[in-house]
Image (tube, rainbow, N blue to C red):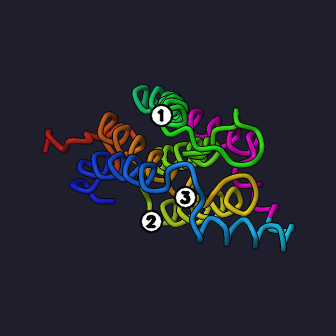
Amino acid sequence: MSGPAIRWWPVVGLSAVFLLGLVVGKRSTPLDDWFSTTGELHPDLGYLLFFTDPPVIAALLAVALLTALWRRRWRLAVAVVATPAVALVLMRVLKRVFGRTKGDDPETLAYPSGHVTVTVAVLGMVVIVVGARLWAVVAASVAAVLAAAGQSFTYHYFTDTIGALLLATSVVCVAAMAVGLDRCQPGCDVRHSTG
């Protein structure tokens, strides 16, 4: 995303989270049903859950944090830890607001997906830590799509994962604005104010 897109995406993304939540309500859509049925017919698709596996995501978060600390980017290090936490809190609030469940357990709230929210928030912070390089954006995007697919084929409705993608990318854009997305070398003048 470019600078202007990073500024307007949080408003668009969060609005879309609410709109999607209102549109799907507490029921599944035909697309949700297709993902669920396909997941039942092809259980090997469950291997895609690797992309939302908590130890994998925790390891990515640790690498991003250690990299930010090594580069002495203190605000970025705080953002690396805070962004997934903020996304997690917002996700929990939204789950209560929409009250959508999947399965027989009425206590298991589904919209938006927590696993995908945290995964995408961490992937987004990894992208920011490495300076939003094209390879990192592509790799994180592919991992995010596979993470969403894994949850869609198993535990969540597809629309739960879309809501999570919208939520997490919105929070990551706010974090990028807060720390100043740095595409230059560590320690340089991010705002290029010294010439």
Q: Residue at x 40, y 27 (%)?
A: 75
Whether residue 195 sits left or right of residue 142 in the image: it is: left
The amino acid at mark 1 is Val
Q: Secondary structure at mark 1?
A: helix
Q: Quadrant of the N terminus?
A: bottom left
Whether residue 163 sits left or right of residue 175 in the image: it is: right
Residue 85: image location, x then y, percent = 53, 29
Q: CA distance from mark 1 to mark 2?
A: 36 Å
Query: Going from the N terminus, do you reach mark 1 or mark 2 first?
Result: 1
Q: Is residue 43 magenta?
A: no
The amino acid at mark 2 is Leu
Q: Quadrant of residue 104?
A: top right
Q: CA distance from mark 1 to mark 3?
A: 16 Å
The label number, if any, that marks residue 134 in the structure image? 2
Reading the image, the residue beneath label 3 is 159
Residue 72 seen by the camera: yes
Q: Quadrant of residue 32?
A: bottom right
Highlighted magenta segment, given as a residue range: 46-69
Q: Residues within 10 Å of mark 1 (few under 14, many from 20)?
A: few
The label number, if any, that marks residue 97 in the structure image? 1
Relative to 112, residue 78 above or below: above
Q: Residue at x 36, y 51 (%)?
A: 13
Q: Residue at x 70, y 40 (%)?
A: 59
